[in-house]
Image: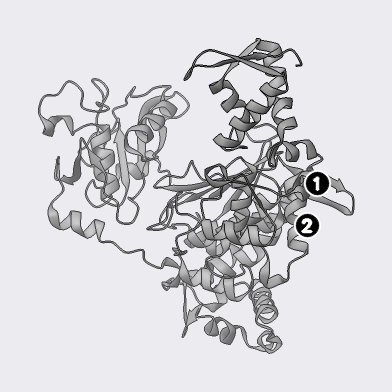
Amino acid sequence: MPRYTIEQLQHMRESEDHVEFKKGEHGNVSYNGAGKDKPQERRRCILGYVAALCNEGGGRIVIGMHDAYPHKVIGTKQCLNGIGQLESDIYRDMGIRPDIYELYEDEEAKSGRVLVIEVPPHPIGKVFKFEDVALMRVGEELKPMDDKTFISIIQEQEPDFSEHICEGITIDDLDKEAIKVMKERYAEKQKNPTFTSLSDAQALSDLRLIIGDKVTNAALLLVGKEEVIERFYPQAKVMLEYRNTESQIHFDNRKSFGQPFFLLIDELWEEINRRNGSVPVRKGPYIFDIPFFNEDVIREIVNNAFSHRDYRFGSEIVIKQYPLKFTIINGGGFPHGVSVDNLLTTPSMPRNRLIADVLSKTGIVERSGQGVDKIFLYTLSEGKPAPDYSKTDEFNVTATLSATVKDTGFALYVQNIQDGLPDDKKLTVFEVLALCEIRDGAKRPSDKEIALKLEKLGFIEKHGKTNAQYYILPRKYYELSGDLAAYSLKTDWDINQVWAVLHPFMVKYGKAKRADINTLIGTHLSEKQLRNFIEELKQQGKLRAEGGRGYVVYYLGENA
């Protein structure tokens, strides 16, 4: 949301401009109404007003100004030197991330301090509550929300902001170079070279970016002149910040990108790539480098942010790049119905469908809805940790990529598989996820059909019998990882492998209970197999047993 000056605030009306003025001169405005007995009195606190303003579509609480127009400055010490803590407390208690700042009537003397709490609009279909009550402002009071307003919010549908007409601009406000790039991308993707010879107006009309002489928001953001985008949608920027260490608060370098998207995306990638590194991978005939930040992944994650963001929010897309980490923060939260848990399984519903459609038709994205799949597929295939969306909330999507290659052997193994498959049979993201599950110790993938397919193709191996069955990656993976000993330990065990595990434990501790042996062997053998091997070791004189039925302790035998 934009930041206002004291002069601008003085001319605002509480109802029309969604602002709540509080004097705060005789003490702080209560944070949560503590100490008040009546609910209607407890609501008149910071958290109560934050909930109500968010439900109204956003607004601001102004502390330190008189509520009578034209809102004389009184001054306040509310949260002096504690703005960051107040932001954190509101986010913790309400799940709402405000923008809080202070203003001074006399900036030089630092007198006449005013505290402003900017509250974002509620996400589509989301109602916020204080003490389990959905609130709305009614005159000077905070009241429980009436049924009509409550139902109207929860039944809201995601509008397609990008297809709306942007009043006040014409085709002359669009950038000819950006249109040229868009036409060339479309011609290449659709294998239609004649598209580049169309007039700009015809090409824009064919892509539904203009309707008659009316220009859509999508057209402005994709191919508009930079100064026009700045005038209408100053929040439609990408801010790239670079920090040498993850602990830094202040950035070492910051660059703003406000061009139309068809010009922005290439320049943004070039800037990111200037500080990009790579991990060299060498194994037999396999020689390649794994980049810290994969170009396809970075482009896709930016494409997603651009087409899914909520342009009602005043914040830009913010990218924080570190030597080994990349974080992108995008206003608006996940589209309705999408969460961290179903990110890969729920069909994509772009918030700005016209933008997504044009990006798909021009080859910026492969196909609408494939973006997150590609991000996960390429990242996991390179032996890196999965993209982390855990810091996403109702108001922002936050995605973090790690540049650390934790398993070069896995990257080599997946590359080996993909090289041997035709283009229409390459591993999908769900199949690579299944391989990751097995690599990370799962007895079997969560998807049984994928497990059977991978086993049939020889990409995973089944070992053990009956209830002790388990999957592992095949010998090829361990060869590429340089750890055939681990493969030997994971495959069906013989008595020598059992003894190789038991003997060091017995030497160190002098004895072992049956529970200890079960823990050491794990799921590699069935109960019957393990019992037979123990009996054989006893017969060989390597183990001896003491104790009765139900409680046996094993010791090293004479031939150990």
Q: Relative to 141, does residue 364 appear above or below in the rendering?
A: below
In the rendered image, residue 321, in percent from the top left (x then y), is placed at 66, 42
Q: Residues within 10 Å of mark 1 (few under 14, many from 20)?
A: many
**Labels 2 and 1 touching (C-beta < 8 A):** yes
Q: Does dot 2 land on a helix, a strand or a loop?
A: helix
Front residue of 20/480: it is 480
Image point 68% across, 31% down: which residue?
A: 245
Residue topped by disc 1: 480
Residue topped by disc 2: 416
N-term-proximal mark, 2 vs 1: 2
Q: Quadrant of residue 542?
A: top right
Q: Is residue 191 left or right of residue 479?
A: left
Q: Tell me how the rendering is colored.
A: one colour
Q: Relative to 415, does residue 47 appear above or below in the rendering?
A: above
Q: Can residue 278 be seen by looking at this rendering?
A: no
Q: Relative to 81, does residue 489 appear above or below in the rendering?
A: below
Q: Relative to 73, does residue 504 appear above or below in the rendering?
A: above
Residue lying at the far top of the rendered structure: 510
Front residue of 513/219: it is 513
Q: Quadrant of residue 535?
A: top right
Question: What separation in Å lies between label 2 and label 1 (alpha carbons)?
Answer: 10 Å
Question: Which amino acid, mark 1?
Answer: Leu
In the rendered image, residue 223, in percent from the top left (x then y), is placed at 59, 70
Q: Can residue 400 be seen by looking at this rendering?
A: yes
Q: Is residue 154 left or right of residue 216?
A: left
